[in-house]
Image (tube, grey):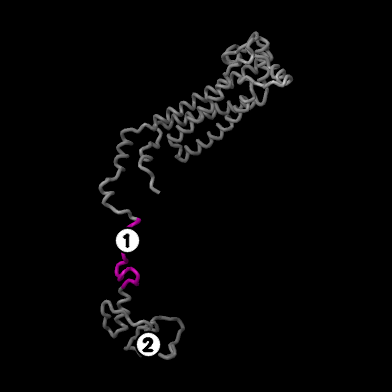
Amino acid sequence: MKIPSFFHAIPRHWRTRKVLIGLFVLELCVTVAALALYGIASPDLYRTKLWQEGSDHGWNSNPNQILYAYANYRPVHYPLPWSKFVTYYNVIIAVLSVFLLLIKGIMFITHVFDPIVSAILHAALIAIYAVSLHAQAGSDMSDPKHPQPGAPWYITKSCGAPVDPKLKGYCQQAKGAFAVTVLLITLFLSYFILSLISLYPTAEHRASHSSRIPDTESLSNSRPWEMTETPHTPGTAGGLKSPTTPRTTAFNILSKNGKAPKKGKAPESGKEPMRNGNGQLPLRHHISMGEEVYSGPNGR
């Protein structure tokens, strides 16, 4: 299968492999931290508690509104930063990030982690984590009396007073999860920028690519090798008969009393070559045949 020429124009080598290795090490540390923080928060370790704390201070809506909606058979609407979606989504993308990190490490070791692959992969990861960042920093406008137009209070405010001291650790964990999300987006953005830099062809790459381009005139005058006829075997009359070798010529001379056969004249079919100088024995009986004993012309 012939690879299109434009694929050869895409650079496959990284400009700075040391920077890439450093990003791998940093990503490993941040991804493990994200997996730990997201996993601890699942399924609802402190989400509802922080929601209730913000409601007590008038910073956001009250979680009891969900119970009122169920009791009055009204549509239930969870504010985005306090919904279960954020917790479960973060756990899923953290596990996915660990898996992709292992895959990237294997591809890098086997020299198949090209910049074009990195650019596509990390662009997708940036989009995935952008959804998580938007959900964590989403607004809560479900209660008109206590609107929250920006990010939740645990991001915009301190975890100290007037917050309940029992919730200080949970508040710091929530801040840490948000910070890890920002770090991962920054890290994947660095991957993406480095991939674009490596994809920009250098002068050496352009020169090497131009030397690979064949002459179009020579291609137009030449025929595809699939359509050409296979040359005949030397010494054959059409490529289907056995070639003439020195040994074959010697046997033919012996079978014709020292006279070479005329060119183009084949022996009669069904007759074996005979040597007149040795009792009309077939030629095959003058070659070592093991314990075989010749019994005469009529007893063959």
* x then y, percent, for residue 81: 61, 20
Amino acid bearing label 1: Glu
Q: Quadrant of residue 233?
A: bottom left
The residue where tag 2 is placed is 281
Q: Residue at x 35, y 83 (%)?
A: 273
- Helix, strand, or loop for circle 2? strand
| Magenta stretch, residue numbers | 226-244
Q: What is the quadrant of residue 36 in the picture?
A: top right
Whether residue 151 can be seen here: yes
Q: Is residue 155 above or below residue 300?
A: above
Residue 143 figure quarter: top right
Name the residue at 38% across, 40% down: 7
In the rendered view, does 231 fall on the left or right side of 154?
left
Residue reaching furthest right? 71
Placement of the C terminus among the 4 image quadrants = bottom left
Residue 221 or residue 88, whichever sits in front:
221
- Label at residue 2: none
Badge 1 is on which residue? Answer: 229
Q: Are marks 2 and 1 in contact (CB under 8 Å)?
A: no
204 up-or-down from 57: above or below: below
Whichever of callouts 2 and 1 sits on the residue coming sooner in the sequence is 1
Magenta residue check for 229: yes
Q: Is residue 37 visible?
A: no
The foreground one among 271 and 82 is 82
Residue nearest the viewer, comparing 74 with 77: 74
Q: CA distance from mark 2 to mark 1?
A: 44 Å
- Relative side of 165 to 300, left or right: right
Q: Residues within 10 Å of mark 2 (few under 14, many from 20)?
A: some
In the rendered view, would you say 226 is above or below 105? Answer: below
